[in-house]
Image: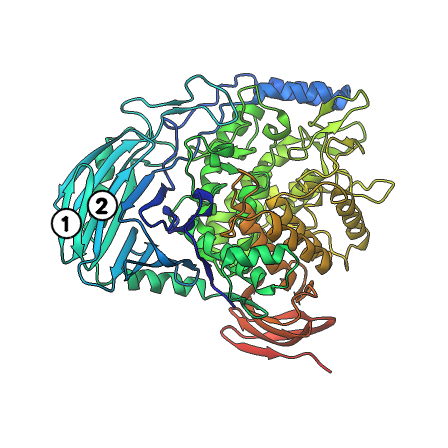
Amino acid sequence: MSNELWFRTPAADWFEALPIGNGHLGAKVFGRVGTERIALNLDDVWSGAGPRKLEVTDGPEVLADVRRLLLDEGDRLAATERTRALQGPLVESYQPLGDLVITEPEGAEDYRRSLDLRTGVVAVDYTRGGVQFHREAYVSTPDQVFVWTVLADTSGAVDLDIALSSQHPVRPSVLDDATVAITGHAPSELTIEYRRSPDPIRYHDGQGIGFGVVLRAHAAGGSVQATEAGIAVRGSDSVTVVLSAASTFAGWQVKPGRDPLSALREATSLLDAVDLAKVRQRHLDDHVALYERAALSLGVPVELPTDERLRAFAAGGNDPDLAALMFAFGRYLLMASSRPGTQAANLQGIWNQDRRPMWASDWTNNINTQMNYWLADVTGLSECFDPLTDLLEGLAESGRETARILYDAPGWVSHHNADIWRATWPVGEGDDDPVWAMAATCGVWLSAHLMEHYRFGQDREFLRDRAYPLLAGATEFVLSMLVEDRDGRLQFVPSTAPEHHFVLPSGEKASVDLTTTYDLWLIRELVGNLTEAEQALGLDTELASRARAAVVRLPDIPVAPDGRLMEWPTDWQPSEPDHRHQSHLYGLFPGAEIDPRSTPEWASAARTSLAVRTATGTPGGWTSAWLVALWGRLFEPEKAAAVIRYYLSNLVSDNLLHRDGDIFQLDANFGMTAGVAELLIQSHTDVIRLLPALPAEWPDGSFRGLRARGGLSFDVVWQDGRLVEATVHAEVDGTFRIALGDEERSVTVARGSLTRLTPEG
């Protein structure tokens, strides 16, 4: 298997630069010779002056109007428009931090640029004037610093000018002979990128998140001189640049107006604590240990640069290892953008170069945030899940007030968008289309991840202290939002299918309706999750009893006469038959109610729905990832493989990062890794299935460390499309049903044991 992306040329633009990070501090390395740019980000530098208040004063009255319009008058269009009155402020935007610019003489021969996924090190090698140069760049998690090194094979050959810059107003300073810094702050007011404004980016003294960036040059030989313009290094054998950064962000409920010098002092303390002789090895020990927990090998690696491999594959070439590299890259990106104590990975992970990024580079909670974390537990990155739990706890605290103001409801709610200030209301200030703003069950979907995390890790303390309170709060909210219709059924109102309009007989488009299929799946799952959690914790609450009584009164899952799962309770004409969201198929994936063996009718309806959804148009990046997982759950490996081929041929940059024109989102990278895992191991039913949807174009391969719900992990080898051997690593005592191809067997394991399984015959 290959663990390296490599190229014969520098990055053409920011999209092609190679990403490194530790969840808090991120960088994209261009690898240029002459003037190198390294773009920097810090996960808690966002626009905004602090937490905001939701100013809606008549939420319950608006809700009553919406319910009347839907239940009594059947006026979907009027109901859709009425929900605009529930909208609050738009979200703030994730911000770039700055650039590290390193200038040296021009000219390079024998050039090679690479990212070693296993070590988290970007390397650049080249020759100039007969001198060989080797650069390395990485971001250390143990030491919380960025490190850049250049070595020459000729004494005194390193001449550099090193400078810091930022798109934000900054003040430079010199801290000592080899240390320089900048301080500044992010905009306190910013107009989101899809809104027009004559003055979209506004800075105000004493407001906004402040930051400090400090760098120090360590040179072997030669001279080092620091000025406000930067650091000049002349005649050195080698140079190591160490950079740290900090912000004044002190929590989502706190105004961030502290002097940026406080952030600079924090960053300088980090820098002063670094042991230069040990920093690289400390980084490697941390990164390699986490990365090595899981691996996938498919065929033989192709010895070509990554961009050339992609072009050959797009032209019809055979390169199974490219899918394995894609799988590994998704794991690497989550390690680099989500670690304990950091913010959760946003739409762009932690990498952003624009002050007004697409969709604010926020947390979009009707699929994208969730997709970022599908891979965490199944591929052995459970620690990387921690920031999502932190995010949910903040959203739940904010969302309790939103539920009270808008709906006079208990529990907590989170709608479509969130930012670092934990916005939980429908955004738009009355001007955004309710098709995405009015999404009151996003918190319900997010809470499902907590139960999934428990299923993989079996951590009862996590379930009791962190997951269960959020599940209970989400349930309280949902129960309060259920209202009885004329037939005695309970309806969740208002309800939407994320981002998808339906067309009324009049030809007008609406989006708000009675309970959509998406919300039915979510509510059914929530009640099941709460019940399962209480059983694990030895509880039997009145809340769970009420929830179970309510769920049986929900509408049935609707199936159209032509066999499709319906998206809305009425079989409305969809505005986009090939729409990017597959929300009505939630019960198939990431939910677990639809299964070809136990619910064949629903599985058939899901298959028919997918056939309609994919009959026209072409999928985008994260849509492709969802399709891979859906086809995997239906045991349709060739359809999944076709989506992977399309994705790698059309929807990635040369560096494998998702790119669709000028759209850059990392959920596609994360989701593709999860989708591949779904083809190789499934554990969402009472049977753990190994190689349930193995594509024919991956005839030989192996994986190591993929996890199953229940506390097991597996190493599997296959040849000619058939499983040869599986090794079960048990973290629990128990008996499990495991399917090796078509053969099922009952396997009893003991905690800490290894059990080898081979197919019979």
Q: Quadrant of residue 14?
A: top left
Q: Identify the amino acid type marked 1.
A: Val
- Report if residue 563 is visible in the image: yes
Q: Secondary structure at mark 2?
A: strand
Position of residue 367 measured from the top left corner of the image (x, y, whole percent): 59, 42
Say which mark, if any, is on residue 161.
2
Q: Quadrant of residue 266?
A: top left
- Residue displayed at 53% across by 71% down: 730
Q: Earlier in the sequence, mark 1 or mark 2?
A: 2
Q: Identify the amino acid type marked 2.
A: Asp
Other residues around mark 1 within 10 Å, as few (<14) / some (14–19) / many (≥20): many
- Residue displayed at 56% across by 61% down: 322
- Residue displayed at 14% across by 58% down: 221
Cα gap from disc 1 to disc 2, whole angstroms: 10 Å
Farthest residue toward the bottom? Answer: 761
Q: Secondary structure at mark 1?
A: strand
Farthest residue toward the front? Answer: 129
**How is this picture coloured?**
rainbow
Which of these two is toward me, 699 or 136? 136
The residue pinned by badge 1 equals 224
